[in-house]
Image (cartoon, rainbow, N blue to C red):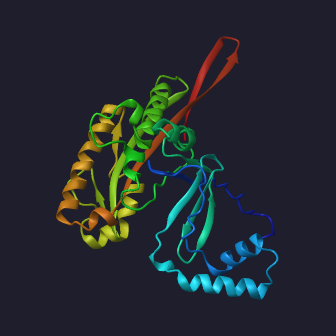
């Protein structure tokens, strides 16, 4: 029998989540008037009509909306974005058949003219700071094919990528590598090692984009333990500069294109993961004084 409170549960670790959206160049902008042919759900049409004509009774408004709805064909109207309010706590007003008007509020909304630097400073920089200070972080890019995920993460396809057009991955790597270089020169750190893995997840299988060797001895082990190989650093490469990372990413992209050519459906169903792993050892010193002078007693603490 264990006494209550003898082994208390550790306090929960806070998790910070942020949801941001970036719009591709297009016609999105300040709120525009709704197309009169836009099909809204019945309850929204009824509410709008009663607000515009308060003299109508509920029954009269119902009859009017029913008559109008019978003449419209909602199924043929495409979903559309009616307006975008960019900035912190921004929003997007959308309309879709069967759902009608709906507003989405997010932590940050990037307009179509937002630069790569704007996106990094808002979303990537806080994560990079947390990472170099010992906190696990993740940036997930989600969207349909052609929505701009690759451009946001890795920049344009032409190489070398200009500095002002680098994506989140390159900008975060530059920040992390600079921090690693400074800590390697700091006597307060005994060691500082940065590793990177570049893998592709397709269904339950994991492929190492930086090597021609398969992960695991067979497909069964790959499906069961592929993620462990990645998280434990078994497919990791040590890097110390941006050119080294650029070379690895180039090799990974070539293998990725070859896989997509062999299996066309792979390109739209596979997920690419770029994983950084930082190992730091801090040198903790203390001075011991005696009659003869002082000695430096140095220990190593791993972060």
Query: Which quarter of the rendered picture does the N terminus lie within?
Result: bottom right
Left or right for 84, reference 230: right
Residue found 67% across the figure and 54% down from its top: 14
Quarter residue 294 falls in: top right
Residue found 53% across the figure and 80% down from its top: 72
The answer to whether 198 is drawn above or below residue 269 in the figure is: above
* Spot occupied by residue 197 in the image (x, y as percentages of width and height): 35, 49
As rendered, which of 26 and 19 lies closer to the eye? 26
Query: Which quarter of the rendered picture does the C terminus lie within?
Result: top right
Figure disc tally: 0
As rendered, which of 233 and 202 lies closer to the eye? 202
Left or right for 207, reference 109: left
The answer to whether 196 is drawn above or below residue 255 in the figure is: above
The answer to whether 32 is drawn above or below residue 241 in the figure is: below
As rendered, which of 228 and 245 lies closer to the eye? 245
* Spot occupied by residue 15 in the image (x, y as percentages of width and height): 64, 55
As rendered, which of 223 and 31 lies closer to the eye? 31
Left or right for 167, reference 118: left
Left or right for 301, reference 204: right
* Spot occupied by residue 108 in the image (x, y as percentages of width and height): 60, 49
Quarter residue 248 falls in: top left
Q: Residue furthest top?
A: 292
* Spot occupied by residue 92 in the image (x, y as percentages of width and height): 59, 57
Residue found 34% across the figure and 48% down from its top: 236
The answer to whether 302 is drawn above or below residue 66 in the figure is: above
């Amino acid at each position: 029998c264990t006494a209550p409170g003898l082994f208390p549960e550790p306090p929960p670790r806070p998790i910070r989540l942020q949801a941001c959206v970036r719009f591709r160049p297009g016609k999105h902008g300040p709120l525009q008037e709704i197309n009169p042919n836009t099909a809204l759900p019945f309850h929204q049409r009824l509410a709008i009509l009663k607000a515009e004509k308060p003299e109508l009774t509920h029954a009269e408004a119902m009859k009017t909306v029913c008559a109008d709805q019978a003449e419209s064909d909602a199924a043929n109207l495409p979903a559309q974005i009616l307006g975008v309010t960019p900035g912190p706590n921004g929003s997007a007003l959308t309309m879709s058949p069967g759902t009608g008007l709906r507003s989405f509020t997010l932590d940050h909304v990037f307009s179509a003219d937002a630069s790569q630097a704007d996106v990094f400073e808002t979303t990537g920089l806080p994560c990079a700071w947390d990472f170099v200070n010992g906190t696990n972080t993740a940036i997930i890019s989600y969207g349909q094919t052609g929505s701009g995920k690759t451009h946001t993460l890795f920049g344009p396809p032409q190489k070398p990528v200009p500095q002002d057009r680098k994506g989140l991955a390159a900008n975060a790597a530059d920040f992390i590598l600079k921090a690693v270089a400074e800590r390697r020169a700091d006597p307060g750190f005994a060691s500082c090692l940065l590793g990177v893995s570049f893998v592709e997840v397709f269904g339950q299988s994991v492929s190492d984009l930086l090597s021609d060797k398969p992960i695991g001895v067979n497909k069964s082990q790959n499906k069961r333990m592929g993620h462990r190989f990645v998280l434990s650093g078994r497919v990791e490469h040590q890097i110390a500069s941006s050119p080294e990372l650029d070379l690895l990413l180039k090799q990974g992209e070539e293998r990725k294109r070859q896989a997509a050519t062999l299996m066309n459906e792979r390109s739209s169903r596979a997920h690419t993961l770029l994983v950084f792993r930082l190992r730091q050892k801090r040198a903790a010193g203390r001075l011991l004084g005696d009659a003869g002078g002082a000695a430096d007693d140095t220990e190593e603490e791993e972060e």
